[in-house]
Amino acid sequence: MSTQSIDTIIIGGGLSGMYAAYLLSKKNVSFVVLEARERVGGRILSLEDHGFFSDLGPSWYWPEMNPKMMHLIQTFGLKGYRQFEEGMGRFEGPNGVVRTVRGYSTAPASWRLFGGMTTLMTKLLEHIPKAAVKFNSPVCEIEKKYNSALISVGELEKEPKAQFSARKVILALPPRLVAASILFTPDLSTDLTQAMLRMGTWMAGQAKFYALYEEPYWRQMGLSGQAFSQRGPLGEIHDGSNKDQRPYGLTGFINIPATQRMREHFLSKAILFQLAAIYGKPAAQPLRFFYQDWAQEKFTATQFDQPPMREHPVYQPPAGQTSIWDGIVHFAGSETADLHGGYLEGALVSAERAVKML
Ligand SMILES: Cc1cc2nc3c(=O)[nH]c(=O)nc-3n(C[C@H](O)[C@H](O)[C@H](O)COP(=O)(O)OP(=O)(O)OC[C@H]3O[C@@H](n4cnc5c(N)ncnc54)[C@H](O)[C@@H]3O)c2cc1C
């Protein structure tokens, strides 16, 4: 098999990898993005129905706290709108009794993107050469060869599907996933590998739903769509509507640990039952229903991500290292950012750092 030589290989076509590609496309260097899935975006996933995109991964950005997101959104001429939060909230106790409670506004304010978060990925794709992104290309091995790296795509112990030689490599995926699924030769140090495994991938164990409706009947009842439940299966619900027009939507997170979740069919029924208990009968009959269990996604979650993460970790480059092998391989990916780690903003922060250090 022939080995293709490239200046820079970016592993992972999530926001971090694709932003690194966008930055590199402004420089005179050759680069390729190797993406394991058949799509870009990684944890960004917005499914379309009648022109509306339901975010099953991230849906919020915070203009007051996310300068790099804001810059990118403005550069691409994208528009956002505030998360709908007007009205009262609902609270469901452990025994299923539902109360109306005071609603609250998030501070700083959360915003959604018109076209869903995936519109950022569409724009990034438009700005880099088409042939630069190789889909269905999971990297399984990286070998140091003098001053460069040999990267194998495919499955370990099998003939590689493709090989690339690169002067520089950007690892634009969660460090835990890197440690669990890519073989390095020579071995990475135990300290570094442990630090990578310990660094939980933000939201990787989560599951999210989206239900779309013709009418925002909860708003008509004076409710904001925001609800919290101690009973489940949903723990947290929010209004996920289009801005002031149909479709209107409810969205939120499942509060059952990944290993205890029932099959999608049963869980979906339980979710609709709970929505009806909280918002009334019409909630059980959405026009469209989406469900995404991130814990089952092998290019996002590992076995270590199955138990629920209770707190937002303090992220930083693993073992304090932003690169290895004398600067041949650089860490990116939101979980390696020392600012806004785990969030979309952190994906941009880490990509910028990696590209600057090449
Ligand atoms: C349900 C949910 C809700 C969220 N809500 C928010 C929110 O509201 N606001 C916010 O700021 N953040 C939120 N986040 C976090 C946000 O999604 C992430 O911070 C961001 O998308 C991370 O981007 P990334 O490029 O660093 O990583 P990823 O998106 O994980 O991208 C990594 C890429 O690497 C690819 N890959 C994996 N293994 C390999 C391999 N071996 N070879 C090649 N490619 C590989 C993957 O397919 C993927 O495309 C949420 C996440 C989830 C799951």
Image (cartoon, rainbow, N blue to C red):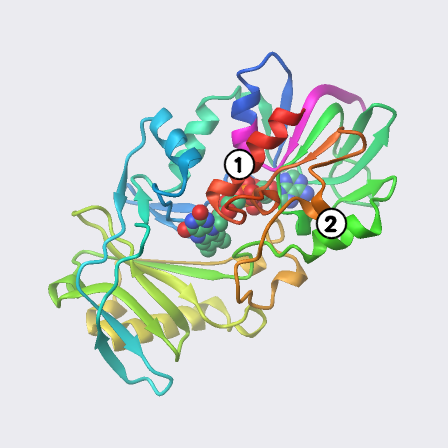
The picture places residue 25, in percent across and down from the top left corner, at 55, 18
The location of residue 284, given as percent across then percent down, is 27, 70
- Displayed quadrant of residue 296: bottom right
How many residues crowd mark 1 within 10 Å: few (<14), some (14–19), many (20+)? Answer: many
| Residue under label 2 | 179
Residue type, mark 2 in image: Ala
Q: Quadrant of the C terminus?
A: top right
- The part of the chain drawn in magenta is 1-20
Of pointers 1 and 2, the one earlier in the residue sequence:
2
Q: Does the magenta stretch include residue 15?
A: yes
Q: Quadrant of the N terminus?
A: top right
- Is disc 2 placed on a helix, strand or loop? helix
Q: Where is residue 120 in the image (x, y as percent from the top left)?
A: 41, 34
Question: Badge 2: few (under 14), some or many (20 or more) residues near its Cα, within 10 Å?
Answer: some
- Report the Cα–Cα distance between label 1 and label 2: 21 Å
Residue 107 is left or right of residue 147, and the answer is left
77 is higher (above) or lower (below) than 105: above
Residue under label 1, please give it.
349
Q: Which image quarter: residue 71? A: top left
Q: Which residue is drawn at 55% across and 75% down?
A: 260
Res. 6 mark: none
Label 1 beta carbon within 8 A of ligand 1: no
Q: Is mark 1 on a helix, strand or loop?
A: helix
